[in-house]
Amino acid sequence: MIEPDTEITRLVRALRGSGLSCCLATNQERHCASYMSDQLGYRKLFDREFYSCRMGVAKPSIAYFRAIVDELGVPPAHVLFIDDRELNVTSAKECRP
């Protein structure tokens, strides 16, 4: 069961309201990804959604993070990545040139 954190939801809305782009990057299987995007409203909450099942690669693979920054068209140094697993953060840092 997935329940959105109301504080995080408010924070994402506030950040987007201030002009920052906010994206979701998550490892999910197709059913959960569809549920999160459609039923939980993540499609509207976030500027972009990056679900591993749709990308064909998952965290902590560096290829996952490279694919995201390539698709966003921004340098890795311009992305703030927050995750609850240190290994994912370490891998994201490896994406920097």
Image (spheres, rainbow, N blue to C red):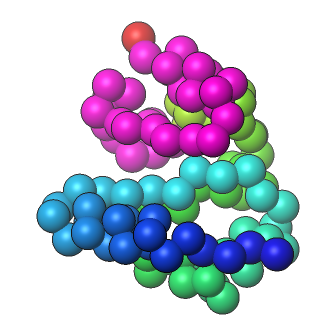
Q: Is residue 77 left or right of residue 54?
A: left
- In the rendered image, the residue lying farthest to the left is 18
Residue at the (68%, 76%) spot, across then down: 3
Residue at the (66%, 88%) spot, across then down: 39
Q: Which residues are magenta?
A: 68-96
Residue 47 horizontal/vertical position (percent): 39, 66
Residue at the (20%, 71%) spot, across then down: 17
On the question of residue 46 being in view, the answer is no
Please check the rendered image and state whether residue 43 is part of the magenta-colored stretch, yes or no.
no
Q: Is residue 87 left or right of residue 25?
A: right
Residue 89 horizontal/vertical position (percent): 57, 28
Q: Quadrant of residue 58?
A: top right
Residue at the (67%, 35%) spot, across then down: 85
- In the rendered image, the residue lying farthest to the front is 7
Q: Is residue 61 left or right of residue 65?
A: right
Residue 59 horizontal/vertical position (percent): 71, 36
